[in-house]
Amino acid sequence: MPHRSTVHEVLTAVFQVRDFDGRPELAVLLWQRALDPQKSTWSLPGGQLCDHEDLITSARRLLAEKVDVREVAHLEQLSVFSDPARVPGDRRIASTFLGLIPLPSDPHLPPDTAWHPVSALPEMSFDHGVVVEHARARLAAKLSYTNIAFALAPAEFAMSTLREIYCAALGYQVDATNLQRVLGRRGVLTPTGTTAPSGKAGGRPPALYRFAESRLRVTDEFAALRPPS
Amino acid sequence: MPHRSTVHEVLTAVFQVRDFDGRPELAVLLWQRALDPQKSTWSLPGGQLCDHEDLITSARRLLAEKVDVREVAHLEQLSVFSDPARVPGDRRIASTFLGLIPLPSDPHLPPDTAWHPVSALPEMSFDHGVVVEHARARLAAKLSYTNIAFALAPAEFAMSTLREIYCAALGYQVDATNLQRVLGRRGVLTPTGTTAPSGKAGGRPPALYRFAESRLRVTDEFAALRPPS
């Protein structure tokens, strides 16, 4: 039976691919603590679960209240962080979420809040750095077997843009031709039939694509295991 | 700020492929409530998270205490069930787990506990039926992109046995040749170099296989997205 007081909190790692000095990088939304404990360290947006709400309702409310983010294209539950010693004082059990914001959305942020590249996090509060890494790993895994990139990409894009998004989210280079071939074969992308205004180097204007669906779908069901159709 | 008292509970859907009237089926471990609320309905094993333990420690403890199950080959966190109205009385936030028991293990069960086919659940308590369906869906998804079947299969097996396990867990027929080809290509299975004592119909004794690893691994990383090696 628990005797120590326990709080249930919700924390969300909100990711977007953003430009840092001309380089697209996976960025995470953090706010800086003005007070102790751990004054000046950076935290994930979140707060306490309320009586009347379930976790996803709470995650959406807290993003709107705390960092003024109202539009996430994808929001999914990650693990619960339940180490009894994860924060000082009352026990805080943290349900964590992954939130994705598409390009070119640019939410207006409060003064204590900023985007940071996931590859160069500032000093993080408590176990929030571990939560960011967990969220990044989930995103990378889902890029390989789902259409989750719809929630990071603009509505229409050239393959070079989609490749930049994949590279930024994965943290390593991927080949655009191979990416297009695999996503095409899996029915993830649809050509819009139009082209961008002009090619980067003044060459042929690149073809534009969009995601066939804007809901998460497992795209590579193992052929042997598909249910009979 | 929460005012109603809140309890954090842990529930585990423990699955094993078991024989029901000569037919292998995915089975789930349930216990029957002797008292109200919802007397006589069937519940997942679980209970309250203790102060000093994290969730997975709690899940293992509760399986040992409540249903005398001490050996699960795989245990993973599923979603949190947090609807404020999911149970009457105090609010109970349920962290749920998927547990898998390999063949031919046959844990000794207390008298109120029994295996039930997932395809024909008895009257379930609260939202426990939804948790079972959620766990089954996670298992089916992971069968398609991971080696998770290691946690249901015996240490060594003929392909016909592995096929039965896949069919039972997925709830539809899969083709043994195709299964062997795909799992072989992904490096999931290793031939033991030996054969079973005799073929089913007195034919050629079938070759035996084992899983190359007994830890969960994503087996179909999308070729275009593999990190540079």
Image (cartoon, coloured by chain):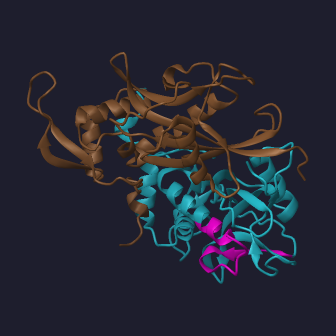
Chain colours: A cyan, B brown
Q: Is residue A207 visible?
A: no
Residue A199: x %, y % from top left: 55, 70
Q: Quadrant of residue B135?
A: top right
The residue located at (32%, 54%) in the rendering is B213
Direction bottom: furthest residue? A21
From the viewer's side, name the closer residue of A91 and A100: A91
B8 drawn magenta: no
Q: Is residue A169 above or below residue A120?
A: above
Q: Tell whether position A118 is magenta.
A: yes
Give the position of the C terminus of chain A as an image quadrant.
top left
Task: Decide which of B31, B139 is in the foreground and name it.
Answer: B31
Against B195, residue A154 (above or below) is below
> Image height check: is B26 above or below B20?
below
Q: Residue at position x 70%, y 28% from top?
A: B126
Pick the residue in front: B113 or A88.
Answer: B113
Where is residue B169 shown, x and y percent of the image?
A: 42, 32
Residue found 52% across the figure and 67% down from its top = A170
Q: In the rendered image, which quarter is residue B12 located in?
A: top right
Magenta stretch? A112-133
| Vertical order, A217 against A103 (above or below) | above
Residue A173 placement (x, y as % from top left): 46, 72
Residue B20 image position (x, y, % from top left):
39, 19
Asked whether residue B88 is in view, the answer is yes
